[in-house]
Amino acid sequence: MMFNSTKCCAYSEITGLSSHTTPKDAMITFCRANLNQAESRVMYHTAPSTQNRLYSFYLFSAAIATPTRKDTYLSNIGDDYGSKFAKFILENKLGEIVESPLRPNMAFHEDHSNKIWIWATDQGMIEKWWEAEKKSNAILKAEQEKALSQLKTKPIPCPLASINKPQVDGYQLRDVNEDSY
C-alpha cells in the first residue's frame, strides 16, 4: 500500500490495495503508515514528524471483473478487494464511504472496469481501532516495543552551544528559535 499525495490538502489516494491479503491487513498497513509516528520512523525509515493526523478523505479504487472479461491478474488477486475494504471500514465504524458506479477503463484498459470509493475518515474511531489492534495482536505488540526501544532520546554534545541537545533517530532536535541551516 502506498499513498499518493494530491495537489489538495483534503485527500490522498491509497494505491496498492490489491497487494493485501485481507481488508484487516490493509487497515493495519494504513494505520502503521499514518498513525504510528514512532514505529513508522523505524519501520519505514521516515524522518521525525509531528504529523499524526489523517486526511479528511482517502480515495481508493479497484478493478472489477465483468462477464466478458477473462483476466489472469484478477483471477490471482480477486476483484472484490475494494468492496471488501469499504465493507471493513463501515463494519468497524472507521468513517463513511461513497461508492462510484462501475465504469470501463477506456483510457488504458478497455477490457477493465473500475470502481472508486471515497472514504471520509473518522480519526477518533480509527485511533481506537488501532490501539485495540496493537494490544491484541502479538506481532504488532512486538514491533511496537522494538521500535520504541530504538527511539530512546539521549543527549549528544553540541559544539555550537554550551548545552547538550537531545537526538532522535540520528536527527538532532533544535530549538524553534535557532537559525536554520
Image: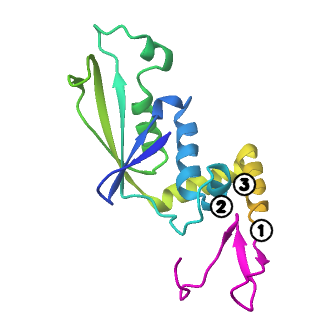
| Quadrant housing residue 137 | top right
Above or below — where is 86 with respect to 71?
below
Q: Nearer the viewer, residue 146 or 5?
A: 5
Q: Position of residue 138 (x, y in %)?
A: 76, 45
Work out how far the residue at label 3 is from the one at label 2, CA to CA, in angstroms.
8 Å
Q: To which residue does mark 3 refer? A: 144
Work out how far the residue at label 2 is from the one at label 1, CA to CA, in angstroms.
10 Å
Mark 3 or mark 2: which is in front? 2
Q: Are marks 1 and 3 in contact (CB under 8 Å)?
A: no
Assign a secondary structure to mark 3.
Answer: helix
| Quadrant housing residue 175 | bottom right
Q: Is residue 149 left or right of residue 79?
A: right
Q: Earlier in the sequence, mark 1 or mark 3?
A: 3
Q: Nearer the viewer, residue 69 or 179?
A: 179
| Quadrant housing residue 160 | bottom right
Q: Is residue 134 left or right of residue 79?
A: right
Q: To which residue does mark 1 refer? A: 152
Q: Are marks 2 and 1 in contact (CB under 8 Å)?
A: no
Q: Which label number is shown at residue 21?
A: none
Q: Give amino acid for label 1.
A: Lys
Q: Is residue 118 left or right of residue 21?
A: left
Q: Which residues are magenta?
A: 153-181
Above or below — where is 66 with respect to 57?
above
Q: Nearer the viewer, residue 115 or 133?
A: 115
Assign a secondary structure to mark 1.
Answer: loop
Crowding at label 2, few (<14), some or many (≥20) Cα neighbours within 10 Å? many
Magenta stretch: dominant SS? Answer: loop
Q: Which label number is shown at residue 38?
A: 2
At 39% from the left and 32% from the top, the residue drawn is 83
Q: Are marks 3 and 2 in contact (CB under 8 Å)?
A: yes
Q: Position of residue 78 (x, y in %)?
A: 46, 19
